[in-house]
Image (cartoon, coloured by chain):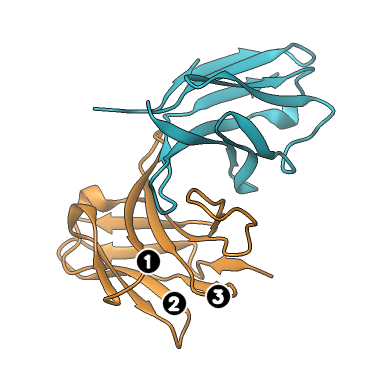
Chain colours: A cyan, B orange
Amino acid sequence: DARVTQTPRHKVTEMGQEVTMRCQPILGHNTVFWYRQTMMQGLELLAYFRNRAPLDDSGMPKDRFSAEMPDATLATLKIQPSEPRDSAVYFCASGPRSGEGEQFFGPGTRLTVL
Amino acid sequence: AQSVAQPEDQVNVAEGNPLTVKCTYSVSGNPYLFWYVQYPNRGLQFLLKYITGDNLVKGSYGFEAEFNKSQTSFHLKKPSALVSDSALYFCAVRDPTSPYMDSNYQLIWGAGTKLIIKP
């Protein structure tokens, strides 16, 4: 049963600390998305990769957020330094090469910045 | 501007009754439309999609959705609701203005509708 995996599932940190979230997309999928979900803003697209190349990261605060895909099996989202307003659930999703737009979501990383 | 609207923040339905969760869209061209469900503390799960063809599409867990081009709507329906259907439902449309000509475009997401099924 192929699934998107994310680590860690929960992270509590203090303001100013670096946070790294990891995602393993479904094997063979060529598109990876990072989303943030909050009660106030709903679901926001942060970044979007195809074949490991970043296509759109306009939703991401550039001064503190960065997203990379060092290889086809790993996507990372880093926040440095973290702030309390970054507290949210961060989702990774992947999409198949032959798909029509379906996205397969991981379980999310719940981040709390104190 | 491209947009998706889910006009109801919450829908309450008694178990066994039919349910409808509404979605309207505003995009240029022919939209690809999707419904996703999110159970508590879980990621979103794909339910169904409309690409072309029959306006009534069937998906997982007994859900179906009806595409209505003249009303620019894609409402989610189920004939008989279950308590286990209680969740957050998102409508989404594939952005036809994306410059990329292959699959896996970005999706434009609705704000979500909380569905509560009461026993």
**On screen, residue A1 above or below B46:** above
Q: Image point 52% across, 24% down: which residue?
A: A109
- For marks 2 and 3 on the same chain, the one whose residue lies earlier in the sequence: 3
Q: Circle 2 — which element?
A: strand
Which residue type carries mark 1?
A: Ile
Q: Image point 20% across, 61% down: which residue?
A: B81
**On screen, residue B112 above or below A94:** below
Q: Circle 1 — which element?
A: loop
Q: Position of residue A79 (x, y in %)?
A: 72, 21
Residue position marked by numbered label 3 in the rendering: B29
**On screen, residue A78 above or below B73:** above
Q: Position of residue B72 (x, y in %)?
A: 48, 80
Residue position marked by numbered label 1 in the rendering: B51
Q: Residues within 10 Å of mark 2 (few under 14, many from 20)?
A: many
Q: Image point 55% across, 32% down: which residue?
A: A51
Which residue type carries mark 3?
A: Gly
Q: Quadrant of residue A46?
A: top right
Name the chain letter of the residue that bears numbered label 2: B
Q: Position of residue B45 (x, y in %)?
A: 35, 44
Task: Pick the quarter of the image with the C terminus of chain A.
Answer: top right
Q: Position of residue B7 (x, y in %)?
A: 51, 70
Q: Quadrant of residue B41?
A: top left
- For marks 3 and 1 on the same chain, the one whose residue lies earlier in the sequence: 3
- For marks 1 and 2 on the same chain, the one whose residue lies earlier in the sequence: 1
Residue position marked by numbered label 2 in the rendering: B73
Of badges 1 and 2, nearer the viewer stands: 1
Left or right of B89 on screen, residue B25: right
What separation in Å lies between label 2 and label 3 (alpha carbons)?
A: 14 Å
